[in-house]
Image (tube, rainbow, N blue to C red):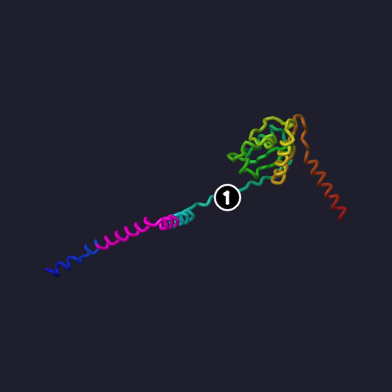
């Protein structure tokens, strides 16, 4: 009888039950120790955060880098109405912006002035007054800026200098009735002068 009872106690079922109880007791003790000490809680939180960051960094999908458009340079003057077509929504996505009578190609700044960008309203516009007054309002007609104060003009010119450094100059913003400049003639004269200089040096 004693042997049978011993065999019964040593059966696989009783062993697994005993092991399970011990595991539960260990887990309960571990949790109790963590709860008792704020430092342990802090350490667990830090470890959980680090594990989360590692897993997230591995599963994060890298966004494709947007290709910057590099369009052929243009050289011509524009009326206010002609300028409106170059707001980044055309077939080539070109963006032209006028400041203080000068037009600049701001296509490289499409992330600022292109469709859906923070300053989309500036694309294809004369933004002189907007920059002078720190506003997003733009004029739909030619603006001679004659009523701007000295401080406002200075502010606008500071912005203009930044545009000169960053973007290509295209041409003038034409006044009503003003004839556009024929830049091809200027380029021909420049090429002729360059050739003459080369021949003299040779």
In the rendered image, which residue does mark 1 sit on?
Answer: 65
Which percent across, then down, holds residue 30?
35, 59
* Magenta segment, prevailing SS (helix, strand or loop): helix
Which quadrant is the N terminus positioned in? bottom left
Which percent across, then down, holds residue 154?
73, 39
Residue pushed farthest right? 200
**Image point (80%, 44%), residue name:** 188
- The answer to which of 111 and 33 lies nearer the viewer is 33
Which percent across, then down, holds residue 27?
32, 59
In the rendered image, the vertical position of residue 37 relative to residue 159, given as above or below: below
Which image quarter: residue 146? top right
- The answer to which of 174 and 198 lies nearer the viewer is 174
Q: Is residue 4 visible?
A: yes
**Image point (83%, 50%), residue name:** 195
- The answer to which of 147 and 122 lies nearer the viewer is 147
Dot 1 falls on a residue whose secondary structure is: loop
Q: Is residue 77 visible?
A: no
- The answer to which of 98 and 4 lies nearer the viewer is 4
Which quadrant is the C terminus positioned in? bottom right
Which percent across, then down, holds residue 138?
66, 33
- Extent of the magenta region: 18-46
Is 83 contained in the magenta span?
Answer: no
**Image point (65%, 43%), residue name:** 107
Give neighbour class at mark 1: few <14, some 14-19, many 20+ (Cα, 10 Å): few
Q: How many tags in the picture?
A: 1
């Amino acid at each position: 009888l004693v042997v049978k009872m011993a065999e019964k106690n040593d059966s696989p079922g009783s062993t697994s039950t005993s092991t399970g109880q011990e595991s539960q007791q260990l887990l309960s003790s571990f949790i109790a120790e963590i709860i008792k000490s704020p430092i342990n809680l802090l350490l667990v939180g830090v470890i959980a955060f680090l594990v989360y960051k590692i897993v997230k960094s591995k599963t994060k999908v890298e966004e494709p880098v947007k290709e910057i458009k590099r369009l052929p340079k243009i050289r011509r003057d524009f009326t206010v109405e002609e300028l409106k077509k170059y707001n980044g929504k055309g077939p080539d996505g070109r963006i032209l912006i006028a400041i203080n009578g000068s037009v600049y190609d701001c296509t490289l700044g499409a992330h600022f002035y292109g469709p859906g960008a923070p300053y989309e309203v500036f694309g294809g516009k004369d933004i002189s007054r907007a920059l002078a007054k720190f506003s997003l309002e733009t004029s739909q007609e030619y603006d001679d800026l004659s009523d701007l104060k000295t401080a406002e003009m200075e502010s606008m010119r500071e912005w203009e200098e930044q545009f000169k450094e960053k973007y290509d100059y295209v041409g003038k913003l034409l006044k009503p009735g003003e004839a556009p400049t024929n830049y091809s003639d200027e380029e021909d004269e420049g090429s002729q002068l360059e050739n003459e200089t080369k021949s003299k040096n040779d």
